[in-house]
Amino acid sequence: KQSVDSTIVSSVVDSNISERTLVHDSNFPLSTQPLLERLRTHYRSMCHTRLIGELHARGEPALHPLRININDPPTFPATFKSMQSGNQILLASVLEFGNVVFPEFMKLEEQGKWSVVTKFFYRFRTFEGCYRATQIFPKHLIRFLPNFTTYLSPGAYASFYDGFPKTADVEGATRYIKDSNFQVKEIAGARKLIARLKPHNEEFLAVIGLMFWTVDGINVSQAISTIAEQYTKQILN
C-alpha cells in the first residue's frame, strides 16, 4: 500500500507541480550572507509563503491581515484536501528555498533537484511538524503539524476525509490512516524528545540544513554527493 503521504506527493506530480514548472523565480538575489543567515531569512520566507498559500487554498472568508502572522498562525484540523494543497505549496517552497539558500542547488539538473527535494520533504515535514507543535501545542503531545496551518491528532481523524464522495470507503480509509505513519506513540515520542532537547532556533536551522543535503540512500550524481559533503562539513564546523 502507498502511504497517505506517497499518495499526496504522487498527486502533486500528477497535477503538473513538477520540478520543470517550479523553476527559480525569486525576488531575492543570490546572497553573500553567511549560511546560517541565509537559512534564517529564507526559512522565514518559506513559512510566510506556506501560511498565505494554505489560507488561500482553504477557500474561506479572508482573515484580517493582522491575523496572518507566522509567529502566531491560525491552526485547523488537517484533512486530506488540506494536506494535498499544503504539500503542493511546501514542495514548491522547498525548491525555492534550495535555490536561494544554496547557490549550487539552483544549477543542478532537474532530476537531481527533484531527488534531493522529495527526500528532504518527508524528513523536514516530520521534524518541523513536531518542533512547531511543541511550541504551539505544548500541552497536547499527540498533535503534529503536517502543514503550516493544520494539525493531526486522533480527534482529527474523524473529519480527515470530509468532502469525499459518498461512495468512497471513508471508514476503511480512516482505519488505514490511524495505522499509518501518523501513529500517536511515534508523534508523542518525537515531541517529548524535542521538548527535552529544547533546540534553539539556530540549532533547528542547522538541522534542516543538514537534512536538505542528507542524500544517503538515493541515486544522485557524484556532483550532488560532493556538494552535500561540503555543506555538511560547513554546517557542522
Image (cartoon, rainbow, N blue to C red):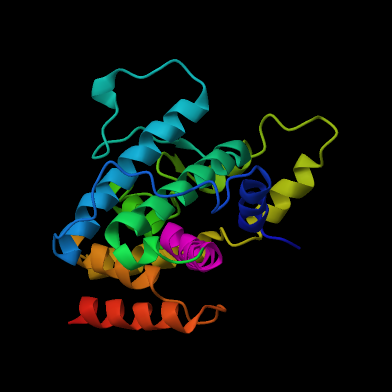
Q: Where does the image place residue 86, in percent across and percent down from the top left? A: 50, 42
Q: Where does the image place residue 83, in percent across and percent down from the top left? A: 55, 43
Q: Quadrant of the C terminus?
A: bottom left
Q: Is residue 57 magenta?
A: no
Q: Main secondary structure of the magenta part?
A: helix
Of 86 and 188, nearer the camera is 86
Q: Is residue 121 magenta?
A: yes
Up the image or down, 64 lies above or below 186; here it is above
Of 187 and 234, nearer the camera is 234
* Residue 1 located left or right of residue 195: right
Q: Quadrant of residue 31?
A: bottom left
Q: Residue at x 56, y 65 (%)?
A: 111
- How many numbered marks are there? 0
Of 57 and 225, nearer the camera is 225
Q: Where does the image place residue 119, in percent across and percent down from the top left? A: 51, 67
* Residue 167 located left or right of residue 220: right
Q: Quadrant of the N terminus?
A: bottom right
Q: Residue at x 81, y 42 (%)?
A: 169
Q: Residue furthest right?
A: 167
Q: Residue at x 38, y 65 (%)?
A: 105
Q: Residue at x 35, y 19 (%)?
A: 63
From where the camera sits, is residue 75 visible?
yes
From where the camera sits, is residue 146 visible?
no
Question: Magenta residues?
Answer: 110-126
Up the image or down, 90 lies above or below 226; here it is above
Of 229 and 217, nearer the camera is 229
